[in-house]
Image (cartoon, rainbow, N blue to C red):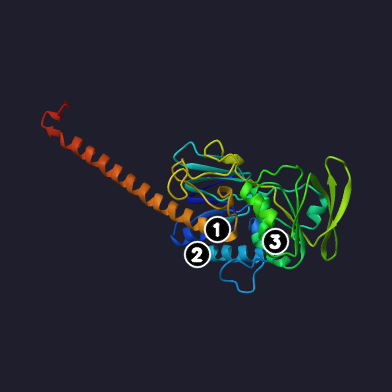
Amino acid sequence: MSQETTARVVIIGGGPAGYTAALYAARARLEPVCIEGYESGGQIARSGRVDNFPGFPGGITGAELGEKIRKQASDFGATFRSEEVISVDFTEARLRVVSADSWYDAETVIVASGARARRLGLASEDEFDGRGVCYCAICDGPFFADQRVVVVGGGDAAVEEALALSGIASSVALVHRRTEFRANATLLAAVAERSNIRVITPSVVTEILGGDLGVTGVRIRNVDTGAETTLDTDGVFVAIGHVPASGMFTDWLDTDEQGFLRASGEGTATRVPGVFVAGDVGDPRYRQAVTAAASGCAAAIDAERWLMGHRGRQIIANRSANRDLAARNAEVTVTEEGMNVRAHS
């Protein structure tokens, strides 16, 4: 039997954005319910070590970071549910969030469902994920200082990754399946000036090679000739885009051309009153744990202020209705003959 829960704030998502939103909402005594899914912690939980989140000299694992923010929110009274949201309905004033076992009627909803890196789809990619296969140069590039790396992709993100890594790694191979790049001309000009960046086109990575200690190379196929070669490398950075977890919200909320949710006004508010967006599901640009946490903070503050204004409007409306009722009652007089009601003109 499905369980019904009424809440002032429901948060969808359990990464740094969702957990930080839960922390701020809980401290504001809004008693938030955070539906974190079955894999709590979001993308950051898959990171072996995070060196660039403020406050943790020496680094911290992604899983530990998520758990610390979650516990902090729990200590202030946030409730967490390990369920997957399967649908939402934002057509009514009371916002509805539905999981397989429960449904939640909320006054406000914070969507922090995250995004995932688009993958190559190779079994070897899964095998070496976190052991040489990476998806963020800013996050993981420093682990490859003075080593050889491969970047896969042809858009702005891939070229930016290659440029960032060229200042850290000893050599960078940029592999793209087409001869022409989609990246802008300024970035491509910068690549041409870096002596340690080698461009390999039109080619695709067909296998990631390695052993117990991690990645040792990649197998590359030329898409025109079919010829295959092996390239020695210590790391592979996949930069072929991100997929936001926004599908169930697109009937109600605005998205950009990539499917990322868009705030429609100031701050994190969407076009649906009482619904706010936080974290990677609304961030095609930065996609960092610290920026996700910051947007979770902002969304919780926006939700709190919206609730205060909404409650204030309700109080004003109720007072107005009570004054109208009092005025109407004042026009009713009782005489010995009975009740007389003065007609309204």
Q: CA distance from mark 1 to mark 3?
A: 24 Å
Q: Dividing the image into 4 quarters, which one contains the N terminus?
A: top right
- Element under label 3? helix
Identified by mark 1, the residue type is Thr
The residue wearing badge 3 is 166
**Foreground disc of the pair 1, 3:** 3
- Element under label 2? loop
Q: Which mark is residue 291?
A: 1
Q: Position of residue 180 (x, y in %)?
A: 72, 42
Which of pointers 3 and 2 lies earlier in the amino acid sequence?
Answer: 2
The residue wearing badge 2 is 76
Residue 157 visible at all: no
**Foreground disc of the pair 3, 2:** 3
Along the horizontal axis of the image, is 294 left or right of 182?
left
In the foreground, 56 or 323: 56
**Foreground disc of the pair 2, 1:** 1
